[in-house]
Image (cartoon, helix red, strand yellow):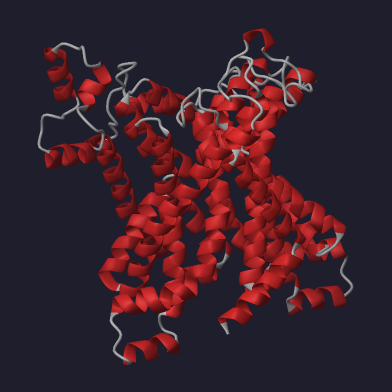
Amino acid sequence: MSRYIFRTIFSALPTLIGVLTCVFLLTRLIPGDPALLILGENAPQEQILQLRKDLGLDQPIYVQYFHYLYQVFHGNLGISLRTERSVIKEIMDVLPYTTELAIAGIFVSVIIGVPIGVISANRRNTMTDFVAMTFAILGVSMPVFWTGILSTLLFSLYLGWLPAIGGGDPANLIDRILHLILPSTAIGMAASAITARMTRASMLDVLHQDYIQTARAKGLEELKVLYKHALRNALIPVITVVGLNMGRLLGGTIVTEIVFARPGMGKLLVDAIYARDYPQVQGVVAFFAAMVIIVNLLVDLAYSIADPRVELS
Amino acid sequence: MVKIRRSVAYKAFVKNKAGLFGAVVVALIVIFGIFAPLLAPYDPTAQDIPNRLAKPSIDHPLGTDQYGRDILSRLIYGARISLVVGILSVLIGILIGVILGLVAGYSGGFIDLLICKIIDVLMSFPMLLLAMAIVAILGTSLVNSILAVGISSIPRFARLTRGQVLVLKNTEFIDAVRALGSNPVRIVFLHLLPNIVSPIIIMGTLYIATAIIMESNLSFLGLGVQPPTATWGGMISDGRAFLRSSPWVSTIPGIAIALSVLAFNMLGDGLRDALDPKLKDEQ
């Protein structure tokens, strides 16, 4: 097992370096001089030269590249031009908000998606199946920001049940959870649709196997057959989808944070783009991608625990 | 043989009600997009401040926005942007992704490893994040939105194509073509490519839906096509400030996005069931 874990982690390293290379190239692809673009055409020449020096743009490109990699692996993602604070500190300040939103989104997607998939598979080709799958296809068709706006309209503006704006009082857990319900539901809805479709397909596959017929023939209750015998095995491919959804969800947090005016990495990125704060754009993009790589790594490991055959292959 | 296969697929598609529904809605959106100047009752950018935030009425069937602009006209023109970004970005994704997938799958070895790593790297960026990063660098415009969404879809098409080529390249008919002395370029483009067109078309149709959502995300964030051009995402964003008093400004373009994405998804699913019945059985 430890060899497998080591091999999996090692194989992710080139991908991480590739991601950092892409992010490095990103700001080098800016048409024209980035310093000029940041400061504006009327900025004094000395200021432009100083910024070029601060950004390391006066060095040869390969020196800039290795310097960038060295700095990143030492935990330095640069200094924000807007706030003049370390980008990694800016990210760390808001990371808990994005992480809790993504985890809550996954939770919502599983508690909605898995039961719908199970029911739909068990009642294949019936009205229930049709309704469940229509929900699934509708779920993936609605943009997250629109679902967010609709839920705000209903649950916050009309009914007044839930807060719609902000991340809540950091010291008050209940308030923080309340502020999480609408955004996580908005973000989890789309992911639940995919989870439901995958669970259904996987359950259909398992329900046709002999051991399920045997369990039924033994006279076990249908619920026990479904949830204890079938779902356990059907969930293995679902883990992969949940993991893949995590990447999607992290992307979805960007718009969700804007809709609900929540602090988070998405808001940090959008603000940085508006302000042309390229070091921050670079830092947040690299951090997001690294998070996706780590999540995929964890999914691979979870998969090997759930299905020991994976490790052997 | 090909004709028979096409006719079987056509019959299977026509029988699929959801797929047919998707095709009809997509056709309607295309018609709206092409004939927008003829169908829109007003100029989509014409302001009429005294009539701002007017409720749906006979004059303005879907109401007006905060500048008094007719929402129906903006919706019809917005279809153009969604379709143009959706279709052209997917074409970019297919063009580059399929070539990368073909080269990786057929050549194997180091080239395959290299391309696979590039795909892995690009797949590590959530699609929206990659699109936003590209727009941050290139700037906001229609062309850059198309490029951003297109580039972010490349790895998905490359991975699909590579997988299909790996399955096909060791089949007997490819061995036979190779034995006849065909060169690799001929084998890839004349023999492998025509056999993987179906999954590419299916995925392309489904990805138009994703691209429409992606474009609306960019426009919503103010990073897509810029005002006063009508975009569905931009219209939703504009209406947010008036959500309580004038909910139609935000909700109607949302319905348009959901309906068109739903239609492309249904069309894609219908095409998959018709062109690849094996997958239908598995579902």
| Residue A138 visible in the displayed image | yes
Q: What residue do we see at 48% from left, 30% from top?
A: A266
Instruction: State the image quarter where residue B198 is shown.
Output: bottom right
User: In x, y percent, where is residue A206?
Assistant: 71, 70
Asked if residue B77 lies left or right of residue A26, the reply is right
Q: Nearer the viewer, residue A232 or B75?
A: B75
Asked if residue A300 lies left or right of residue B16, the reply is left
Instruction: State the image quarter where residue A160 is shown.
Output: top right
The residue most toward the front is B38
Residue B260 lies, with reference to residue B246, above or below; the image says below
User: In x, y percent, where is residue B1?
Assistant: 58, 85
User: In x, y percent, where is residue B253?
Assistant: 65, 32
Q: What residue do we see at 14% from left, 39% from top?
A: A61
| Residue A288 visible in the displayed image | no
Q: Which quadrant holds the N terminus of chain A? A: bottom left
Asked if residue A73 lies left or right of residue B24, the reply is left
Residue B127 lies, with reference to residue B253, above or below; the image says below
Q: Nearer the viewer, residue B70 or B35?
A: B35
- Give the total number of marks visible in the rendering: 0
User: In x, y percent, where is residue B98?
Assistant: 40, 63
Residue B121 lies, with reference to residue A108, above or below; the image says below
The residue most toward the top is B50
